[in-house]
Image: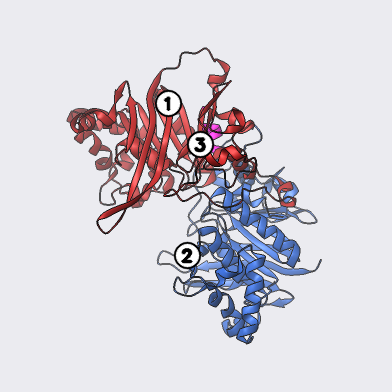
């Protein structure tokens, strides 16, 4: 949102992903019989101090993409450039010592993400132990972070165990754990989708304040356009392992260009008593099998605007005016 | 349109080691033919307990169940389970549980799931039951040959359709839908909602639609009951509740929904819902309410504002 107001502003990239492919091999006995193309030719960048949202349905590859950026799944090809260095080509030791310290992760289910036998203090201290933060400083940072995420007074929470906290409180601990090393980039994978509506907004507002205060970049992975609208400045829409549209969040939501984005936004309701009198226009069929994606555009079997060309040639990610990129032949 | 369900003063307490859980208190609403009521509220507010009290789908630790539930003209609250099963369940009312998608038995074919209530409860001959299953499965938008497949061969959206088909096959008057689309993707959810709308207009069934997703609830609801800590705090027509909610909790809840098509600010309600073992004195929302006055330490009455509009809050006076 801020970007569209000041288009001349210098954009400094923190993370640049180029033509990234993550193909999971499918094995039968001892031979590889094919690949699931979970992420297939994805390029984008995350500027410093901004929140970028990745939106898509389940199975579109958004979580695999995040895991690849974290270094949790092997990359098939392409590069992940963080502060000018290609992480996929760095030696493992450097990645462990330097890169993992710069990137924090907040997962979807806080109950599954926290070891149940550790208390909050141990959970928050662990990353600092691994990255050799001096002992004197650890406690100071733990107290500070707990206060920042709104778990006050922090002393009350230090020796509690995950099962003693509510989902919202535990997700605050997860955010504190992701931030305790002061990372430059935080990957938030559906951080609020398990929470209730009013808690959701509370956690997201707090997260956004912290993001501004610590000048972090955030990659916000979600299936929810509505929270992405309030929380991110830029949005990327994924379908079947590829990015189909990138742009400023509010522009994309107001006037989606890719047929998939358009369909997805049109079926999302707002609370409106008129909704019950109309039927939604949905796309026919289901997302393709990523072992054998359709030739040409991956949306072509479901697209209402499909042309001959779409069935055979894959469209490039076309640049349009107004900081927008669309992977669709309609705009060629 | 005739009335198919009337709930009055419904009370449901569960027995636990630390005292009774006051899951539902003073619940009330009516439902007419072809009408849909949405029960909305955050998790733990008693939506599912209320629905389960209506259809008698309760755990063993029920301490108290009282009030009045009139289903299609018949008072059911004092019926024995056997009587309820014989006269009401399947015939008048069915229930699509939360996570119903995983409630299908993976080693039983779709067709056998569908004909079971007909053959067992209604003694319909098998060939006729299969014929009805064939019609039913088509009307929920699944090709006929899927009848002879196993549930694990179907996608999540299709399994949800099968479960809805199962809930409709005995021609009930009321179907309780408990979070029917929460586990589904956006596009699949829209397809299921479309299908539910078509079925409602074709078959004239009434829904009790339980969801925590307020935007989705507006896809079906003719009227809305907002629940908080076991109470229905507001009940009114969709036109009223979604546009201009009255109770401070409904205002907060509606205000916390991010909108795609307008730029109104989103807010949240500070604090957390109370324990239902030891709820606050007086109004249960009082500790979180910004309009709270000393008066709120007394239990607020259910105040009738319009023909079908009720709110449980001292702000609207006592008449």
Does any portion of residue A222 appear in the rendered image? yes
Label 1 marks which chain's residue? A
Does any portion of residue A153 appear in the rendered image? no
Above or below, B192 relative to A5: below
- Chain A: its colour in the image is red
- Dot 2 surroundings within 10 Å: few (below 14), some, or many (20 or more)? few
Using residue B14 as the reference point, say whether residue A82 is left or right of it.
Answer: left
**Contact, mark 1 vs mark 3 (Cβ under 8 Å):** no
Magenta highlight range: A226-233
Q: Secondary structure at mark 2?
A: helix
Residue A227 part of the magenta-drawn span: yes
Above or below, A221 relative to A36: above
Using residue B296 as the reference point, say whether residue B222 is left or right of it.
Answer: right
Q: Which residue is mark 1?
A: A45
Q: Which residue is mark 3?
A: A314
Q: Which residue is mark 2?
A: B153
- Chain B: its colour in the image is blue
């Amino acid at each position: 949102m801020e970007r569209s107001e000041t288009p001349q502003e210098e954009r400094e990239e923190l993370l640049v992903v180029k033509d990234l492919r993550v193909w999971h091999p499918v094995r039968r006995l001892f031979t590889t019989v094919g690949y699931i193309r979970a992420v297939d030719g994805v390029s984008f960048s995350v500027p410093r101090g901004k929140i970028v949202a990745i939106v898509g349905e389940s199975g579109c590859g958004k979580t695999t993409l995040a895991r690849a950026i974290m270094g949790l799944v092997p990359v098939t090809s392409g590069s992940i450039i963080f502060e000018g260095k290609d992480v996929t080509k760095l030696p493992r030791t450097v990645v462990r010592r330097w890169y993992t310290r710069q990137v924090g992760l907040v997962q979807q289910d806080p109950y599954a993400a926290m070891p149940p036998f550790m208390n909050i203090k141990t959970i928050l201290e662990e990353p600092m132990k691994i990255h050799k933060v001096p002992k004197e400083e650890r406690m100071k940072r733990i107290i500070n972070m707990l206060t920042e995420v709104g778990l006050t007074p922090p002393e009350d929470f230090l020796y509690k165990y995950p099962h003693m906290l509510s989902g919202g409180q535990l997700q605050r601990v997860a955010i504190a754990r992701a931030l305790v090393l002061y990372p430059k980039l935080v990957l938030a994978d559906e951080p609020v989708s398990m929470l209730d509506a009013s808690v959701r907004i509370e956690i997201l507002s707090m997260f956004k304040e912290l993001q501004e205060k610590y000048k972090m970049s955030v990659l916000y992975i979600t299936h929810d356009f509505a929270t992405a609208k309030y929380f991110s400045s830029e949005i990327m829409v994924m379908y079947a392992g590829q990015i189909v549209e990138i742009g400023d969040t509010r522009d994309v939501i107001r006037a989606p260009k890719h047929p998939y984005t358009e369909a997805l936004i049109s079926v999302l309701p707002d609370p409106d008593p008129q909704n019950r009198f109309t039927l939604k226009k949905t796309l026919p069929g289901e997302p393709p099998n990523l072992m054998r994606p359709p030739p040409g555009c991956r949306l072509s079997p479901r697209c209402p605007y499909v042309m001959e060309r779409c069935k055979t040639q894959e469209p490039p990610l076309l640049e349009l005016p107004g900081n927008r990129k669309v992977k669709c032949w309609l705009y060629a | 349109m005739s009335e198919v369900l009337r709930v009055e003063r419904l009370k449901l307490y569960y027995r636990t080691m630390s005292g009774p859980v006051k899951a539902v208190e003073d619940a009330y609403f009516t439902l007419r033919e072809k009408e849909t009521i949405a029960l909305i509220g955050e998790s733990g507010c008693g939506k599912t307990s209320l629905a389960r009290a209506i259809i008698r789908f309760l755990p063993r630790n029920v301490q108290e169940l009282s009030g009045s539930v009139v289903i299609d003209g018949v008072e059911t609250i004092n019926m024995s389970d056997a009587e309820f099963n014989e006269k009401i369940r399947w015939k008048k009312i069915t229930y699509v549980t939360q996570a119903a998608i995983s409630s299908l038995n993976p080693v039983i074919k779709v067709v056998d799931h569908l004909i079971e209530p007909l053959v067992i409860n209604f003694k319909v001959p098998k060939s006729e039951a299969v014929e009805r299953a064939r019609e039913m499965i088509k009307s929920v938008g699944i090709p006929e040959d899927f009848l002879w497949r196993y549930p694990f061969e179907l996608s999540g959206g299709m399994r949800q359709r099968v479960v809805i088909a199962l809930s409709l096959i005995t021609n009930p008057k009321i179907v309780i839908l408990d979070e029917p689309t929460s586990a589904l993707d956006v596009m699949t959810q829209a397809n299921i909602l479309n299908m539910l709308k078509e079925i409602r207009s074709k078959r004239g069934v009434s829904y009790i639609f339980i969801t925590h997703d307020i935007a989705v609830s507006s896809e079906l609801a003719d009227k809305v009951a907002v629940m908080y800590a076991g109470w229905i705090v507001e009940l009114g027509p969709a036109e009223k509740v979604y546009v201009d909610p009255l109770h401070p909790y409904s205002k907060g809840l509606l205000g916390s929904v991010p909108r795609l098509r307008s730029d109104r600010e989103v807010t949240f309600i500070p604090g957390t819902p109370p324990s239902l073992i030891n709820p606050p004195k007086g109004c249960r929302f009082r500790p979180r309410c910004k309009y709270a006055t000393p008066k709120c330490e007394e239990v607020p009455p259910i105040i009738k504002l319009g023909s079908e509009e009720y709110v449980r809050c001292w702000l609207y006076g006592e008449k």
